[in-house]
Amino acid sequence: MSADPSSRWGWLDALRGIAALVVVFDHTSYAFMAAFRRELMPQFNTSRYGVMVFFLVSGYIIPASLERRGCVRTFWIGRVFRVYPLLAVAVAAVLTLHLAGYAEIRAEFGQRSAVAVVAAHVTLLQELLGTPNVLLVLWTLSYEMAFYLLVVALFTVRLHQRSAAVAITLAVLAAVSATAGGVLPPSALSGAIGTGPLITFASVAMVVAIGCASAGSSALRVFGGVLGGALALVLVCFNGTVPLWEGLVILAVMFLGTAVHRAENGQSTWRYAACTAAVVVACAVGSAYGNEDGSQFTRRGWIVAFLLAVLTFGTGLVSRRRRIPRRLTGLGTISYSLYLLHPVLLAVTDATIGRWRQDNLVAEIAFVTVLLPLCTLTHRYIEAPSRRWGRRLARRRDDLGARDGAGA
């Protein structure tokens, strides 16, 4: 199923498709294009480019989805049926193939119990709970979940229109933390109180937060929203594995996407959105410039990737009223499948044919050639049906709520 190229979301689908392919290349290049990767990464960090485009798109779409529905409970139902079904299939597939000897899982779980690992992944906050990701790409979903919790928090306290102010605040805090240097080590909370207790506390807090924020009582909704937002901020600030400045930049980028959406829909001005973008970009670039990580990412590679991601989003925004090529919108339609399934297929190739010592463009193309139809199938038979079920359940809940209100 392809998105309509002329629809108002066509440009966003195109951006997601481009970002997904870049992330696929970033990870498969370890196996098939290692020499080219070593030359490219210091100049252009493909991983950060892809995920920053994804974060901008999420920031544009997610709060709008919540506000359009006007119901926290319906919002969470939609997110659960959008995110979890394919995620569960991908994780189950890689674990099954690993046990059968056909897939290689590179995550090291150490002494962590299976219950703790499962609980951390069910919350989708595993990256922020000191737990390695079963699939290497899942770290970004932890920041997505933190963003969801913050968006719900702002909605419940009626500050959701302040997206630009939130983006600027987070960006400035990122710059301040970057100036202060490495104040806290990665996963500081896990080191202080233990990963197991932190997972238990966060899991319970998240269930209570979502449950209360979805309740009928306004007081409970505010309590649940604030609890979830506080949990997200604490974990991002004190237990992330990326530097604090980058974690804050990620959140600022998502709220920048929201600020752009508000400007487009007349809830704010384009001048305000442009000023917000200028502050976020300046703070992000400044933070990265003073914090080079020679072991993994160079400042130039990160900065170039970040600026190109913002430019890509801006180009899509300017072109939003034009007809988008169907192939690009089609890639966007299956982008979530591309994102989750390529590490599964890569785990299989790692365990079977291994990694190439010399660049092999044919192997790279063959990988994508196999991946695309597989993702088309998972979108058709897993993603699309689960989203329909989610919409039906949400409508049923809305209808019940309307009847209860009429009966009262």
Image (cartoon, grey):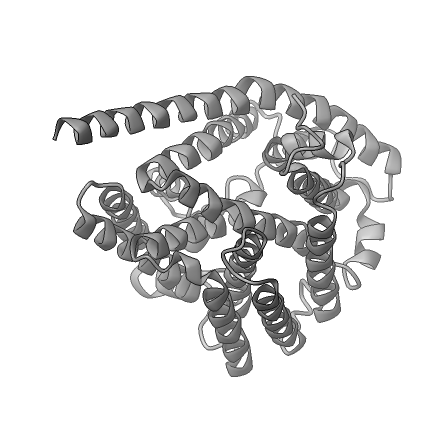
- Residue 130 visible in the snapshot: no
- Whether residue 312 sits left or right of residue 87 in the image: it is right
Q: Kindly indicate the quadrant of the structure image that contains residue 78.
A: top left
- Whether residue 357 sits left or right of residue 108 in the image: it is right
> As rendered, which of 141 and 33 lies closer to the eye?
141
Which residue is painted at 23% across and 49% down in the image? 221
Question: Residue 91 appears at what percent x and percent y?
Answer: 50, 31
- Whether residue 323 sits left or right of residue 160 in the image: it is right
Question: Residue 147 appears at what percent x and percent y?
Answer: 45, 53
Which residue is painted at 65% across and 51% down in the image? 53
Q: Kindly indicate the quadrant of the structure image that contains residue 2.
A: top right
Q: Using the image, determine if residue 234 lies above or below residue 172.
A: above
Q: Quadrant of the C terminus?
A: top left
Question: Residue 249 appears at what percent x and percent y?
Answer: 55, 65
Q: Using the image, determine if residue 342 lies above or below residue 249.
A: above
- Looking at this view, name the residue that lies furthest to the left: 408
Q: Kindly indicate the quadrant of the structure image that contains residue 195.
A: bottom left
Question: Residue 52 appears at what percent x and percent y?
Answer: 63, 54
- Residue 9 visible in the snapshot: yes
